[in-house]
Image (cartoon, rainbow, N blue to C red):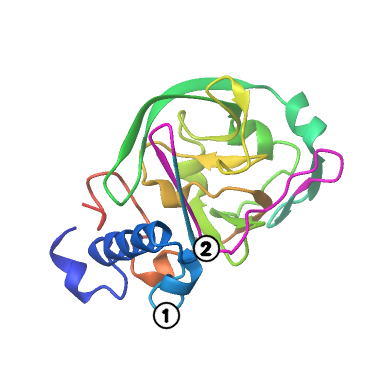
Amino acid sequence: MDHSSDSRPYGRRAFLGIVAAGIGALVVGRPLERVTAHLSPITSLFVSDGWRIYTVASTMPEFDPNTWRLEIGGLVSNPQTLSYDDLLSLPQAEQVSTFHCVTGWTVEDVHWAGVRFADLLAAAKPLPQAKALSFVSAELPYVDSLTLEQVLEPDVMLAHRLDGAPLSQPHGAPVRVVIPEMYGYKGVKWLQRIELTAAPIDGYWEQRGYDRDAFVGHSNGY
């Protein structure tokens, strides 16, 4: 972490220390929630195929393709409510990119498939004053935001597939934000609402000391 880590209310070293404490708790058979309750909002850690899945709620959101809806509102002229089938009917895109976690690990050559934000937002018709998007996860109270300019970059997408398969529950089913140039905490999982706003907000981890613009190698992650 950079020079500002000691002044941050919640920095990378603290995060890693808490994760280590949580792993120790799992080894001795105590719930991770009990260990981290007074230290950190992190309540779970799952490790699989190079991925480490952190959650801030005690359980992961459930996905039912028959009832799930994605709402798009705020500063738009035509608010949208999309079903899973609606999402799949939009123009689809694929990409291979590296995933970077702010805690220091990476997963290379991740194959994502999903929808570009230009296509996702086309029917909603953002108003001229809309400059940012707030992403609300079903894993409450997790939220984060990106600028409209950022989400329209060519390698940013709302992904629904990972390495050739639909997103699993730990990876944020049914959809998650993917922005390879930023650390993973900006990639909101279990997405249920997008709100277009006049300016970006401080998300869950920004409220705990991390940078709003989490560019890999240029924020307080490293």
Q: Is 103 included in the stretch rendered in magenta?
A: no
Label 1 is placed on what type of residue? His
Give the vertical position of 145 relative to 70 (above or below).
Answer: below
Q: Name the element at disc 2.
A: loop
Q: Are marks 1 and 2 in contact (CB under 8 Å)?
A: no
Q: Quadrant of residue 165?
A: top right
Residue 105 located left or right of residue 22: left
Residue 119 lies, with reference to residue 222, above or below; the image says: above
Q: Main secondary structure of the magenta part?
A: loop
Q: Which residue is mark 2?
A: 56
Residue at left offset 68%, top offset 22%: 91
**Marks 1, 2: nearer the viewer:** 1
Horizontal and vertical percent for residue 154?
47, 28
Q: Nearer the viewer, residue 183 or 101?
A: 101
Q: Residue furthest front?
A: 28
Disc 1 and disc 2: Cα gap in Å? 13 Å
Q: Is any part of residue 202 visible from this angle?
A: no
Q: Which sits in the foreground, 61 or 35?
A: 35
Residue sitting at the far left: 3
Q: Position of residue 85 (x, y in %)?
A: 81, 31
Res 38 label:
1
Please, which residue is most extreme toward the right here? 66
Q: Local crowd at mark 2 within 10 Å, few (<14), some, or many (≥20)?
A: some
Q: Which percent across, then down, holds residue 161?
A: 60, 28
Tell me the magenta residue range. 48-70
| 49 inside magenta stretch | yes
Q: Is residue 17 above or below residue 151?
A: below
Quadrant position of the N terminus in the picture: bottom left
